[in-house]
Every structure is written in C-alpha cells, then in structure tokens.
C-alpha cells in the first residue's frame, strides 16, 4: 500500500462514493443494487462493518462485511484499478478477519462471480477455498462461486459456547 493509505471505518457521508464504486467495479452488467441508501444502512447497522482504505486524495478501496452468530459474510470488496496489486485488498480483508476472529467467528463466506478468475485468485491467495458453484445466483443470469475461509480449527469451532 502507499505510505499514506489508512484503513478506517466509513462514515455516512461516504455512502454515495462507495455505492458508485460498487456500481462501476463490482456490479458491472448486473444492474446497480448497492445504491447509496443500502450502503448507508450497512454503515449504520451494528452487525456490519464498512471499511475503507483512504489515501490523502481518494478512497482506494472498501469492503463490507456482515457478522452473524457463527460466520461472517463478505458482501462487497473493491479496489480502484490504479490502486490494485499494492496490498490494499489484502489489508482490508486481514483487518476484517482479525476482528471476526476476535469476535469468535468461525468462518468467512462470500460469493464471487464464477467467471471472475482474478478475484478468485486473490481470495485463494488469502486462504479462501472454493466451496460450491451456485447456478444462476446473480439474477438468474450468472453463476457464483461460494468461497470460505475458516478462522478456527474444527475442534475450536466445536467448543464455541
Ligand atoms: C480482487 C481485488 C479486490 C484485489 O484487490 P488488490 O488490492 O488488487 O489485491 P492485493 O494487492 O491485496 O493482492 C494480494 C494478492 O492477491 C493475488 N491477486 C490480486 N489480484 C490478482 C489478479 N488480478 N490476478 C491474480 N492474482 C491476484 C496476488 O497473489 C496478490 O499478491 P501479489 O500482488 O503480491 O502477487 C481487486 O482486483 C478488485 O477490486 N477487483 C474488482 C472488483 C472485484 O472483482 N471485487 C471482488 C468481487 S466482490
């Protein structure tokens, strides 16, 4: 990451910029479902985290994760093209994985377009494993690949209260 890149929680005033990043970098060809109001709801929701990587000049990337009882679900992740391959995506995910582990979460799940080989390689590089293909997951049109990263050994997960 560039030296001036910092990881911090999103503020309500960031919702529009993050929604535009989702539209332009993630939801291309699918229709825009992560509108500003939906991102704002995530920023304000106590069981979700909207995390950003900011430089002095711009938002380099962001991630949204929802925390459930046993698992967390990564809803969105994007890094601006000119900021990619600098470790921004990995830094966002490691921040989220560390908080999930501290919160006693056993695993992180996500869905990624099955044809998004670059993102799948990225997730595999940070210990996500291919779980299953979900046919027609995106509006009945495109398949998704579910990926999972275990944060606990099976023995640790079995001992959760
Ligand atoms: C996927 C994405 C978030 C990765 O973010 P990033 O900041 O570029 O990733 P990092 O720099 O942290 O990469 C860490 C490692 O992941 C792997 N990786 C990252 N991008 C990759 C690519 N395009 N092809 C193959 N491997 C890749 C590499 O092993 C990389 O380490 P290296 O650069 O030392 O080789 C980014 O490419 C992106 O925003 N893509 C568009 C939106 C998207 O597809 N989001 C995910 C689906 S919701």
Image (spheres, rainbow, N blue to C red):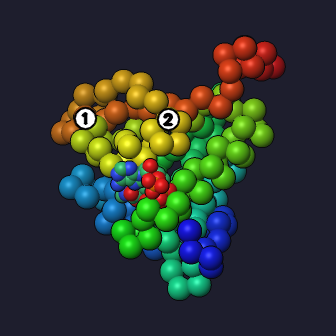
Mark sitting earlier along the chain (2/1): 2
Residue 32: name its quadrant.
bottom left
Q: Is residue 34 visible?
A: no
Q: Quadrant of the C terminus?
A: top right
Give above or below for 157 relative to 25. above
Which image quadrant shows ligand 1? bottom left
136, above or below 25, in the image: above
Image: 19 above or below 143? below
Q: Nearer the viewer, residue 27 or 38?
A: 27
Q: Residue 37 location in percent, x, y?
A: 48, 63
Along the viewing direction, whichever of 54 and 118 lies nearer the viewer: 118
Q: Quadrant of residue 12?
A: bottom right
Residue underneath mark 2: 128
Q: Residue sitting at 44 percent across and 70 percent down?
A: 83
Q: Quadrant of residue 130?
A: top left
SS at circle 2: loop
Q: Residue at x 72, y 37 (%)?
A: 101
Q: Which mark is residue 143?
A: 1
Where the N terminus falls, by quadrant?
bottom right
Q: How many marks?
A: 2
Label 2 C-beta lies within 8 Å of the nearest ligand 1 atom? no
* Mark linked to residue 111: none
Q: Residues within 10 Å of mark 1 (few under 14, many from 20)?
A: some
Residue 44 appears at what percent x and percent y?
64, 59
Query: Which residue is the extreme one toward the bottom?
Result: 57
């Amino acid at each position: 990451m560039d030296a001036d890149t910092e990881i911090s929680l999103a503020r309500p005033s960031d919702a529009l910029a993050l929604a535009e990043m989702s539209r332009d970098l993630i939801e291309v060809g699918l229709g825009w479902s992560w509108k500003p109001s939906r991102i704002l709801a995530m920023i304000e929701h106590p069981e979700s985290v909207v995390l950003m990587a900011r430089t002095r000049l711009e938002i380099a990337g962001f991630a949204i994760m929802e925390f459930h009882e046993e698992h967390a679900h990564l809803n969105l992740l994007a890094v601006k093209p000119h900021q990619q391959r600098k470790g921004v995506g990995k830094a966002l995910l490691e921040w989220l994985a560390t908080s999930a582990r501290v919160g006693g979460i056993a695993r992180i799940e996500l869905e990624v377009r099955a044809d998004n080989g670059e993102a799948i390689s990225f997730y595999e590089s940070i210990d996500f494993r291919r779980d299953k293909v979900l046919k027609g997951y995106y509006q009945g049109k495109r398949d998704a690949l579910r990926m999972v990263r275990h944060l606990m050994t099976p023995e640790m997960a079995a001992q959760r209260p």
